[in-house]
Image: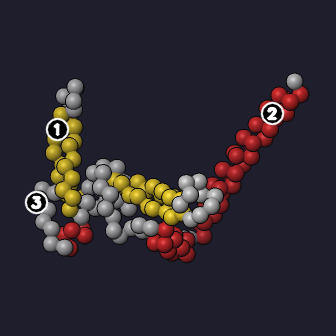
């Protein structure tokens, strides 16, 4: 999914070198704002940047071993730095429903790719663990 925020792109100059660079002016206008009656500048275009996702887990006790925790989903566009995406899940409950639906609709071939990727990751971790155990055994013999 690409960012649909509206931005104004102008040409600027890089600091120091003076080379021409693309300067992005975020307009803070989204599809949500337009539906609420906001107006965008006529030269505004869709951003099209990649939306980066972070899941932040907050615990009540600071370590997660006792008490409760909650997940917060944070979005940020790599191009315009926008963070407002109301169409995407925003809390643990919405994220759970979103992932449940995504998994239910996942084709078998994609699921098999996930299985293979996970198995490859497990194999690498096991090799690293075995190498560490071998090093520790050598140190104990000394």
Give the numbered dot on residue 114: none
**Residue 112 location, x and y as percent?**
63, 64
Foreground of the two, 75 or 101: 75
Disc 1 to disc 3: CB gap under 8 Å: no
Residue sticking out furthest to the right: 141
Q: Position of residue 101 (x, y in %)?
A: 51, 75
> Can residue 125 be seen in the rendering of this structure?
yes
Disc 3 target residue = 42
Which residue sits at x=45%, y=55%? 54
The residue lying at 19 percent from left, 73 percent from top is: 36
- The residue that label 2 is drawn on is 136
Q: Give me the C-alpha separation between circle 1 and circle 3.
A: 20 Å
Left or right for 54, reference 17: right
**Closest to the observer: 91 or 78?**
91
Dividing the picture into quarters, in which one does residue 67 lie? bottom right
Is 22 rendered above or below residue 40? above
Camera-near label (2 vs 3) is 2
Instruction: Residue 84 in the image: state x and y as whole percent.
Output: 31, 62
Q: Where is mark 1, residue-wise?
A: 12
* Quarter of the figure that contains the N terminus: bottom left
Quadrant of res 137 = top right
Pick whichever of labels 2 and 3 is earlier in the sequence. Answer: 3
């Amino acid at each position: 999914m690409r960012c649909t925020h509206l931005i104004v792109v102008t040409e600027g100059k890089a600091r120091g070198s003076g080379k021409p660079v693309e300067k992005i002016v975020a307009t803070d206008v989204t599809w949500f704002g337009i539906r609420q009656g906001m107006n965008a500048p006529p030269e505004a275009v869709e951003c099209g940047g990649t939306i980066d996702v972070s899941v932040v887990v907050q615990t009540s006790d600071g370590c997660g071993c006792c008490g409760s925790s909650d997940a917060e989903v944070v979005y940020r566009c790599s191009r315009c730095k926008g963070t407002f995406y109301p169409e995407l899940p925003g809390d643990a409950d919405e994220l759970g429903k979103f992932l449940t639906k995504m998994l239910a609709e996942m084709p078998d071939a994609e699921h098999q790719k996930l299985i293979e990727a996970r198995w490859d990751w497990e194999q690498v971790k096991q090799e690293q663990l075995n190498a560490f155990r071998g090093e520790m055994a050598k140190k104990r013999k000394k």
